[in-house]
Image (spheres, helix red, strand yellow):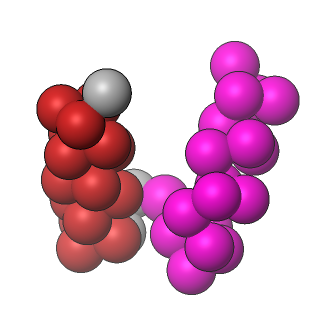
């Protein structure tokens, strides 16, 4: 699980810096639920 959290952290950081995801300003816990809903 630790590795999953690390990967998610890196992915969130990547999206935030790349600008591909304009909703990166949303708190991680909420954005995770949003992604699950979208997928």
The stretch of residues the image draws in magenta is 21-39
Question: Quick check: 2 above or below 22?
Answer: above
Point 64% across, 58% down: residue: 29
Front residue (pair 29, 13): 29
Point 74% across, 42% down: residue: 33
Q: Position of residue 6 (x, y in %)?
A: 20, 46
* Residue that protrudes farthest toward the bottom in the picture: 25
Corner quadrant of residue 31: bottom right
Point 81% across, 29% down: residue: 37
Q: Is residue 7 magenta?
A: no
Predominant SS of the magenta segment: helix
Question: Quick check: 39 above or below 19?
Answer: above
Q: Is residue 35 visible?
A: yes
Judged left or right of residue 12, residue 33 is: right
Q: Position of residue 23 (x, y in %)?
A: 61, 67
Q: Is residue 11 visible?
A: no
């Amino acid at each position: 699980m630790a590795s999953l959290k690390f990967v998610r952290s890196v992915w969130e950081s990547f999206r935030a810096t790349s600008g591909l995801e304009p909703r990166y300003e949303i708190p991680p816990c909420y954005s995770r639920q949003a992604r699950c809903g979208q997928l």
